[in-house]
Each structure stands twice: as C-alpha cells, then as structure tokens.
Image: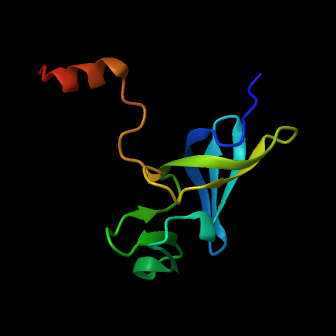
Amino acid sequence: MYRPIKGEVVDGVVESVNELGIIVDCGPLKRVFVSQSALPENMVYKSGIDGQNSRVYIDVKSQQQIIQNTQVRLRLRGVNNETLSAVAEMSSDFFGHQFHFYKPYSQIFHDTLGFT
C-alpha cells in the first residue's frame, strides 16, 4: 500500500489550471493541489491566451508554460492518507515544469558515457 509522506518529491501531470493554483495527478495521489503562492515566484496566471478559453501559468523570464497535461515535479507539504490527496509546492530549485520524465536508466547510462 502506498502511503505518501510529507516532504516526499513526486512527479505528476497537471489535471487542471485555475487562478487559485493547479491540480496535479501523481499516480495514486489523484488530487494534489499546488496554490498560486507555492508556484515559482516568476509564474503569472493568464486565461484566454490566443483567443481561446485556455488557462495557463507562464514564467515571465523563461516563457515556460504550465497548462493541462504538463509534466511537473513537486514536493508534498501536507498529506491526507485516507483520501490520498495532498497539498504541495513547486517553488524550490529543480521543481516545476519537467522536460525529460521517465527516461529509461539504460538511456541515461548511454548518454552519460557518450554511446551512440
């Protein structure tokens, strides 16, 4: 049985975005809430980008976007083991938008040693 603990680092996929923050699906943890204040400080909420009904958090420096289905890394700050829900943060280094999830270990090994 999976029992998440406070301080654990998890990867997940953004389920929804709104002005209060984001909801992330982290496998067994179906509803992990990250409030706007727990996002990186450069993130700004915008809606209706490109004339659509999309909702997005944009990093004003790097222009990275957090939208629905974005893969993210976060740290759990509070956990409810009965409902498997949690509250988390992404404001520390190495958290937030992730580009290379689930890269096989063999591929990392080959990349590190320079095999082609």
- Quarter of the rendering containing residue 42: bottom left
Please tell me how many numbered marks the rendered image carries: 0
Q: Is residue 25 left or right of residue 85?
A: left
- Image coordinates of residue 94 in percent, x first then y, are 43, 49
Image quadrant where one finds the N terminus: top right
Residue in view at x 85 percent, y 42 percent: 83
Q: Which scheme is used to colour this image of the protein?
A: rainbow
Q: Where is residue 36 in the image (x, y as percent from the top left)?
A: 61, 70
Quadrant where the C terminus sits is: top left
Residue that appears at 37% across and 64% down:
64
Tell whether 71 sits left or right of 62: right
Residue ID at (51%, 52%): 69
Q: Is residue 114 above or below residue 86?
A: above
Nearer the observer, 2 or 31: 2
Position in image of residue 38 (x %, y %): 60, 64
73 left or right, relative to 109 = right
Toward the viewer: 70 or 11? 11
Q: Position of residue 41 (x, y in %)?
A: 49, 71
18 to 7, vertically: above or below: below
Q: For residue 111, which quarter of the picture? A: top left
On screen, residue 49 above or below 90:
below
Compared to residue 49, the image places residue 36 above or below, namely above
Left or right: 82 in relation to 65: right
Front-most of 67 and 95?
Answer: 95
Quadrant assignment, res 27: top right
